[in-house]
Image: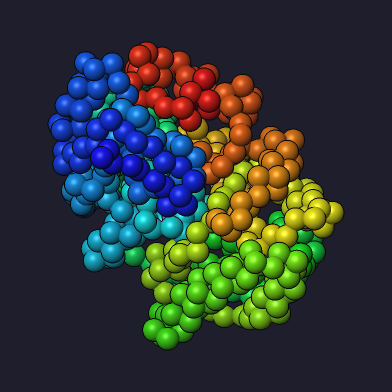
């Protein structure tokens, strides 16, 4: 029986012709040469946290399980094997008294998988993971192994800027070097706010906080706002019981039960959301940065996320609120909002502009394609860029209008992989 790959959400799967678990760049290069000789395709998967088909292949599927570990630490840099889970990277950095300046809230992703799909987190001054990359080791379609960095010139610098968010279309990453800094504390404050109040103070909220993240509960006017800012200490982490109560029981166990109830009784969802909104309270903690940045997510969902120009965030939220209010949809999951500064990675969703991210989720057992389609219509009208690893229906014709370097990326791909050794159905749509 052939191995079947399925993603975390269970909405994407593939049956590759062969599965390999390479432990080195040389083994990956050998797999690439074998695929070229057979006339088949080859892809490296991560841990399956993308909702799109970006990792799928019917050819040779490479698993990251043996390509892990911290390879070098020093001079404000850390070099890791591409398959290293972010949770392992965080723990190793902390052991060395170091930290990433910013990160997303999921830590199960691999280092390479996270940057290839544009994982971004939220930050006023510091961008996503790709913006903290200083060097990449990559296997190209001819089987060669090359290294490019922020200090590269000419075509090698182009490859660095393109491959940081490269969708695996330019080659297979084997090692990633991140810029790091001394470990620091974050003071995290959570409190409920009315969506109307937020809409009138967006500029103040985003400018006053290093890391702003808020969740709007549909069918209510209530948001949970998270403000995370650096702190000199002392540390004041939640106790083990409080951490379990907030991070495991309330945000996962109880929330999962509410989602399941809503799936059985959709008419009750507005009332359930109102109860959840009323139960939100203020809290704060001062803790190791990665423990504040990251969250536990066990309730399975489907997600669409778009990046819009920061100045259009208020309009996007107002239109989204009106859409939900005027529809018959019953939406259990909160809508999440984050911000980042401009990026210079060619296919970063924040390329060249201050960006705001609006993420819409639905409970996995109750997909709602109509909701996602209507949200997408709003975001596209506002020049939105879809997250590469989250559900959307955009193709190369549209994406070429919102990414200034899209044509350069495609030209570089044509030069490096003319036979489309690294392609798949998803890339055929989004890159052409």
Residue at image coords 70%, 45%: 370
Q: 264 or 214, which is in the foreground?
A: 264
Name the image quarter holding the N terminus. Answer: top left
The percent coordinates of residue 124 (x first, y second) are 56, 54
- Left or right of 28: which side holds 219? right
Q: Which residue is nearer to you in this view: 276 or 189?
A: 276
Instruction: Tell whether 186 sits left or right of 71.
Output: right
Q: Residue at x 38, y 37 (%)?
A: 14
Residue 50 x, y percent position in the rendering: 45, 45
Res. 57 visible in picture = yes
Is 283 situated above or below 198? below
Residue furthest right in the image: 326
Residue at image point 41% right, 47% down:
7
Which image quadrant is residue 221 in? bottom right
Relative to residue 336, is residue 33 depicted above or below? Answer: above
Image quarter of residue 398: top right
Residue drawn at the location 18% of the way across and 34% of the way down? 25
Q: Quadrant of residue 61?
A: top left
Q: Position of residue 290 (x, y in %)?
A: 40, 64
Left or right: 155 as drawn, with respect to 22: right
The color scheme shown is: rainbow
């Amino acid at each position: 029986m052939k191995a079947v790959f399925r993603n975390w959400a269970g909405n994407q799967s593939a049956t590759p012709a062969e599965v390999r678990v390479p432990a080195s760049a040389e083994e990956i290069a050998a797999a690439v040469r074998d695929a070229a000789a057979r006339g088949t395709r080859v892809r490296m998967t991560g841990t399956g946290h993308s909702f799109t088909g970006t990792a799928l292949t019917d050819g040779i599927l490479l698993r990251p399980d043996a390509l892990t570990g911290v390879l070098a630490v020093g001079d404000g840099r850390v070099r890791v094997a591409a398959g290293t889970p972010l949770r392992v990277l965080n723990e190793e950095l902390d052991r060395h008294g170091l930290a990433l300046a910013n990160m997303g809230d999921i830590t199960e992703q691999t280092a390479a998988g996270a940057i290839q799909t544009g994982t971004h987190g939220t930050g006023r001054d510091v961008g996503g993971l790709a913006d903290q990359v200083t060097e990449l080791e990559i296997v190209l379609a001819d089987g060669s192994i090359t290294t490019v960095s922020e200090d590269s010139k000419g075509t090698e610098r182009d490859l660095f800027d393109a491959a940081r968010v490269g969708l695996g279309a330019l080659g297979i990453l084997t090692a990633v070097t991140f810029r790091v800094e001394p470990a620091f504390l974050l003071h995290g404050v959570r409190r409920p706010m009315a969506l109307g109040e937020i809409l009138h103070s967006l500029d103040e909220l985003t400018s006053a906080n290093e890391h702003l993240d808020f969740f709007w509960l549909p069918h209510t006017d209530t948001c949970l706002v998270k403000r995370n800012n650096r702190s000199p200490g002392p540390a004041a982490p939640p106790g083990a019981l409080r951490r379990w109560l907030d991070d495991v029981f309330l945000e996962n166990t109880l929330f999962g039960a509410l989602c399941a109830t809503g799936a059985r009784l959709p008419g009750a969802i507005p009332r359930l959301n109102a109860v959840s909104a009323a139960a939100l309270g203020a809290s704060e903690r001062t803790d190791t940065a990665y423990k504040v940045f990251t969250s536990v997510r066990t309730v399975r969902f489907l997600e669409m996320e778009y990046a819009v120009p920061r100045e259009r965030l208020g309009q996007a939220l107002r239109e989204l609120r009106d859409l939900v209010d005027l529809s018959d949809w019953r939406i259990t999951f909160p809508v999440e909002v984050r911000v980042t500064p401009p990026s210079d990675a060619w296919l970063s969703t924040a390329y060249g502009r201050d960006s705001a991210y609006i993420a819409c989720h639905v409970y996995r057992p109750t997909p709602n394609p109509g909701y996602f389609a209507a949200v997408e219509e709003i975001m596209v009208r506002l020049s939105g860029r879809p997250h590469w690893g989250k559900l959307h229906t955009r193709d190369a014709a549209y994406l070429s209008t919102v990414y200034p370097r899209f044509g350069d990326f495609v030209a570089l791909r044509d030069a490096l992989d003319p036979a489309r050794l690294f392609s798949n159905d998803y890339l055929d749509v989004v890159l052409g």
